Image (cartoon, rainbow, N blue to C red):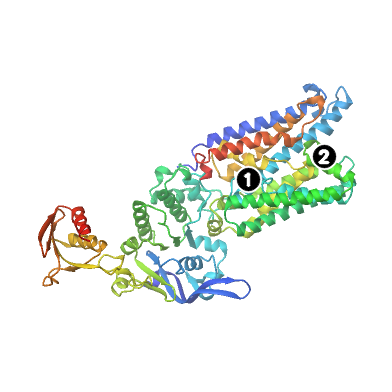
Amino acid sequence: MKSATTILSAQQLSIGYKSGHNGVKQIHENLAFSLHRGELTCLLGANGSGKSTLLRTLSASQPPLAGEIWLEGRNLSELSERELSRLIGVVLTDKTQTGGLTVYEMVALGRQPHTGFFGRLDHHDRQVVEEAIESVGMTHKAHSYMAQLSDGEKQKAMIAKVLAQECPLVILDEPTAFLDAVSRIETMTLLHRIAATQNKAILLSTHDIEQALVLADRLWLLRKGHGLYCGETEDLILNGDLDTLFDRRDICFDRAHGSYYPSVQWGKEIVVEAGDETLLHWTVNALNRNNYGCRIAPDGSSLALPRLTVKDAHTLTLHTATGAQGFDSFANLIGFLKKQD
Amino acid sequence: MNARPDKLREKVLIAILLLLLITLCAANLWFGSVQIPASAVWDILCGRESEKEVWRFIVLESRLPQMAAALLSGAALAVAGLLLQTVFNNPLAGPSILGIDTGASLGVALVMLFCGGSLGLTESTTLTGFTAIIAGAFAGSVVVLGTILFFSTLVKNNIMLLIVGIMVGYITSSIISLLNYFATAEGVHSYTIWGMGNFSGVTGEQLPYFALSVVVGLGIAILLIKPLNALLLGDRYAANLGVNIKLTRNLLLIVTGLLTASTTAFCGPVSFIGLAVPHIARLLLGTSNHNTLLPVTLLCGAVTTLLCNLICILPGESGILPINAITPVLGAPVIIYVIINQRKIQYFN
């Protein structure tokens, strides 16, 4: 079943740069992976882990140092520029000069691999362009200038361009960088939907781990010196592969919430008892930030530690050796704790 | 959904430009230091007998070549400027700013000064001399273009690249000055006259060669409209759309070199047309799409230089103004306007 939908695969791939006469800067070796139609794959990794190099190698912008990449059963290095332009579409972070084009004209540039010498659009081309604009929800802006769009809309227009290109494989380099939270979520949801509905293989690199964990059908984790780990999101999380994505002891992965947080040595300890999960989470968050390590009741209830009971967000009670004190907000509680120091 | 709802704007604009072009052509033939009635000019153009033989000579041997030279130079320089602005991803690029016409001048200077005054662009210039001058101009402009292209791989910042271009231009100018110092008085004289730039230097016999090189250059430019549009997205996007970047870039630079070099060789270095006219065209047209931008730039360039030439010949009996005294007066305000309003102008963002 899986192999039937595989569009791109590689074994024992080495990537990096050739510089000067014999200088070779190898970034990764022995990479093995495959991409499947209908799936959104997110490539995660720290800055400098080689994400961009891997994406450039996969989009045939630079050759691999060793090994072969197979795209729909053909060796990537043997495909002509024109064939490649119909198989792999890219969305980059490069600055463009398209401010003076309308969204329609810019998206129509995506038809270039299919049009003739002068790039004239026929009826079918126009239809594809219009469908592409519609599927990213930009029909109402089709005649706006690119310069008039917000960053999120610009990114949607670039995605429409790549859809108009009609490539089975789409590679995006950090499509959500520079976007605000709403546009990030919209863009990722859009890509996830396109992968499924248009049966495309979509690979994107991102630092937006939160969104990737929610929407990626498959994760690729790239670590400098360790290579690439591929798998279903949940398998990777529960196997602890995300714990070591960043080679840093002071950055921990919270498996329960799917996010990274800084690990700190707490100066003081406190016992916390809270009404529900949400209250507990944010209480611990507030205390951690203010240099308190938390023990969750009833775990440390026998110890002679201060004890905080949170019934709801406006009913907080702090029990200390000297007695109990009530607070009606976290602001007051934190103010009191700070005065104690 | 149409590609562009205001097709009408394009059509009206092109019609107006064509009308202006014809009017300015007529005005260029009509005005001059000698007063010739319009009816006589018309008769001469239609090949009929005119009252005075000297009128026939003036119109056919002086005014017509001058008008054609102005038209061709304008079209050539404006399109060269547009190509440079797209290739370098920089709206402030232009043949004179990047020192490309200075490069052409250096080539011409080398030929003129070293072969003595005999090769100056005078009435008596031989065809070989001419070919030498054009070849010199072409070689000079392509060397400068190549140098700037090389620097563009090192300097990613657009403004910095422009400054590099200006520096290259300065170095080229000083080499020309040095050449002048060592050259014969005759050579210096013909070079200086040429360097002031004017469209009246092109004779009837030279015109076909000039026209041929400009038409070839413009023809290739029109064939490159599709990759030019792709280049608006930047090199990497264009490559992903199947554009052979190296080939396209080289072709575009050769075309730019050819257009700039032929104009510079025949009419001297003409400033500001290449820089300002593409902006005028974009502002009038409201698009960066080369499908319409390139033809409109071409027309605007021809109209602008015909207008400049008309202003040059207006003093009438007291002589002709140098073209480079007029073009900056028209061109510089456009660039200042564009820079001041860049936030409001779509194609800048």
- Amino acid under disc 2: Ile
Q: Chain of mark 1?
A: B
**Secondary structure beneath label 2:** helix
Task: Work out whether A150 lies above or below A87.
Answer: above
Q: Which residue is mark 1?
A: B82
Residue B198: quarter of image: top right
Chain letter for the residue marked with disc 2 in the picture:
B
Residue type at mark 1 is Leu
Rendering coords of residue A40 (x, y %): 37, 63
Q: Is residue A263 above or below residue A113?
A: below
How far is mark 2 from mark 1, CA to CA? 28 Å
Answer with mark 2 or mark 1, whichever residue precedes in sequence: 1
**Outermost residue, left direction?**
A323
Closest to the observer, A17 or A154: A17
Mark 1 lies on a secondary structure that is helix
Q: Please rate how many residues cluster around mark 1, counting C-alpha atoms within 10 Å: few if below 14, some from 14 to 19, many from 20.
A: many
- In the rendered view, tell whether residue A202 sits above or below residue B318: below
Q: Would residue B226 be visible to someone looking at this image?
A: no
Mark 2 surroundings: few (<14), some (14-19) or many (≥20) residues within 10 A: some
| Count of picture labels | 2
Question: Looking at the figure, which quarter contains the N terminus of chain B?
Answer: top left
Give coordinates of residue B200: x percent, y percent: 80, 35
Which one is in front in this view, the residue at disc 2 or the one at disc 1?
2
Considering depth in this image, is A119 or A105 the residue closer to the camera? A105
Q: Which residue is mark 2?
A: B193
Q: Is residue B138 above or below residue B194?
A: below
Seen in the image, is B294 located left or right of residue A101? right
Relative to B131, is A271 on the left or the right?
Answer: left
Res B67 quadrant in image: top right
